[in-house]
Amino acid sequence: MTSDLERWLGEVRIPPRDETRRIMAQCIIGLATLHSLGIIHADMKPANVFLDERLNVKIGDFGLSRFSVEPRPLRANVGYGIVRVGTELPGGLLGVGGHFDGDAGRRR
């Protein structure tokens, strides 16, 4: 990753509309995908949105993330194609239930 959204916004000041829309769409797709898996990020902010050199988004810092009671299927058309994600958490993703301390790599 070359930067995060917070740093990029500080450098660009007034970001171009097309880039803003693209970054926001990727954030929305990422969060919708997490929610469909039953994962609540709980600390979404510009410093936790990482950007590569082409301004592609990766959501990071899952230290405060939690699992919701029930994962929900995702099927959304958000302008970048249809996204389909299964409803079950893979066995080795993060574990099941409770709170996952992503920064320390352990469940609480």
Image (cartoon, rainbow, N blue to C red):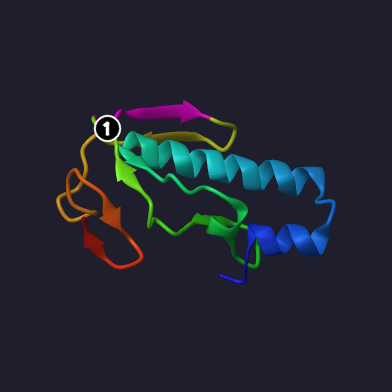
On the picture, is 99 further left or further right than 83?
left
Is residue 22 in view?
yes
* Observer-nearest of 44 and 22: 44
On the picture, is 23 further left or further right than 16?
left
First to last magenta residue range = 70-77
Relative image position of residue 36 (x, y in whole percent): 34, 34
Is residue 49 in view?
no
Give the answer, above or below, for where 83 lies relative to 56.
above
Q: Which residue is mark 1?
A: 71
Residue occupying the point 56% across, 31% down: 78
* Observer-nearest of 107 and 1: 107
**Where, quadrant-wise, is the C terminus in this rendering?**
bottom left
Which picture quadrant has residue 3? bottom right
Give, as a three-letter code, the residue at label 1.
Pro
Relative image position of residue 95 (x, y in whole percent): 18, 52
Residue occupying the point 46% across, 41% down: 31
Give the answer, above or below, for where 86 lies relative to 5.
above
On the picture, is 57 further left or further right than 68?
right
